[in-house]
Amino acid sequence: MQRDLADANSTITAVQGVRVGHWTEHRALTGCTVVLFDGRAVAAVDVRGGGPGTRETDLLAPGRLVRRIDAVLLTGGSAFGLAAADGVMRWLEERGLGYDTGVARVPIVPAAVVFDLGVGDQHVRPGPDAGYAACEAASAAPVAEGGVGAGTGATVGKWAGPQYAMKGGLGSSALPVPGGGTVGALAVVNAVGDIVDPLDGRLVAGAYDREKQAFLTLKAARAASPFGGSGKPAPPATNTVIAVVATDVVLSKEALYRVAQMAHDGIARTVYPAHTPWDGDTVFAVSTERVGAPSAPGREEMEQVGVIGALAAEALALAVLRGVRAARDAGGLPAARSLPRG
């Protein structure tokens, strides 16, 4: 894997035209994160796994009317948290932003949620005021990571049961594009699976036995695992990795759809197992169109997609790792940084 940019900002806000803001409720262990664009951005999405919670994703499919969006919201609170998008829309509307319908400008704000109601206070969820506050906090500064924003209540390693779960979090990264431009990623890591560093294959966070101070493995715990055919109930749809990958290189909506597909490889490299029936893994891909010129459909555009998509997968893998490594103990759950080193 490549490592991060050499400059001071190695997060998604290194992409020209991208700003990020968080709203965080530490006591209730929930929050939301908004990605804003200086000017509207071309966007697409690819949704995998069996338990997604989303808003406005159908609009991002190739061939649909709207090509550009105004923001992306990633939020906790399960489906309740989608209400935070109303606050993002209000913030954008106040600034005259949105899709011009001829009678009003309607802000386009796709959103995806993670289920964090099992930690903290399940009665506290991000709402419109939280989405608005996240917009107010947005900046092009390096993104705060770990237990912030939509990653505040994120957990991982739930395949063996919640008693073995560890703290997840929010992470971000950015990589340079050969010839100019940047690809960045922002991920909320709330997976049913374990988090693995693909460089050495070691577990970073996952199902962890706190008494023995050791990770479980699918093989050793198969009798107790919902994947082991024990007859025990499978985990509910309480997990997911949601992410935004962004570039300032000019790409069409159709090309970005391919980038979103390729970016999912970053989840598959770092989350084991990934894209399960109990995850709702969702990746938004956006272009702020600051570098280069449109490519005609065909070989040239596909070559460009190949480069950007590969970097997006790399950046997303890094963002997943950074999210769990930056997280701190919360809600009675240990974080990767607090485990005994050995």
Image (tube, helix red, strand yellow):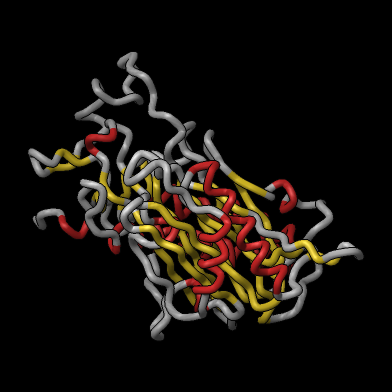
Viewer-side residue, 317 vs 64: 64
In the rendered image, the vertical position of residue 237 relative to residue 180, given as above or below: above
In the rendered image, the vertical position of residue 327 relative to residue 120, given as above or below: below
Viewer-side residue, 216 vs 39: 39
Question: In the shown orientation, is residue 294 left or right of residue 102?
Answer: left
Viewer-side residue, 66 vs 26: 26
Give x and y (percent) for residue 77. 47, 46
Give x and y (percent) for residue 335. 23, 54
Question: In the shown orientation, is residue 51 left or right of residue 29?
Answer: right
Q: Quadrant of residue 73?
A: bottom right
Question: In the shown orientation, is residue 42 left or right of residue 225?
Answer: right
Residue positioned 65% across, 64% down in the render: 305
Number of marks drawn: 0
Residue positioned 90% across, 64% down in the render: 103
In the rendered image, the vertical position of residue 80 relative to residue 307, given as above or below: above
Work out whether residue 204 can be spotted. Answer: yes
Question: In the shown orientation, is residue 280 left or right of residue 54?
Answer: left
Q: Quadrant of residue 246?
A: bottom right
Residue occupying the far bottom of the picture? 7
Work out whether residue 321 can be spotted. Answer: no
Residue positioned 68% across, 66% down in the render: 70
Residue occupying the far right of the picture? 102
Quadrant including the N terminus: bottom left
Give x and y (percent) for residue 301. 72, 66
Quadrant including the C terminus: bottom left
In the rendered image, the vertical position of residue 231 relative to residue 192, given as above or below: above
Residue positioned 42% across, 47% down in the render: 124
Give x and y (percent) for residue 244. 54, 60
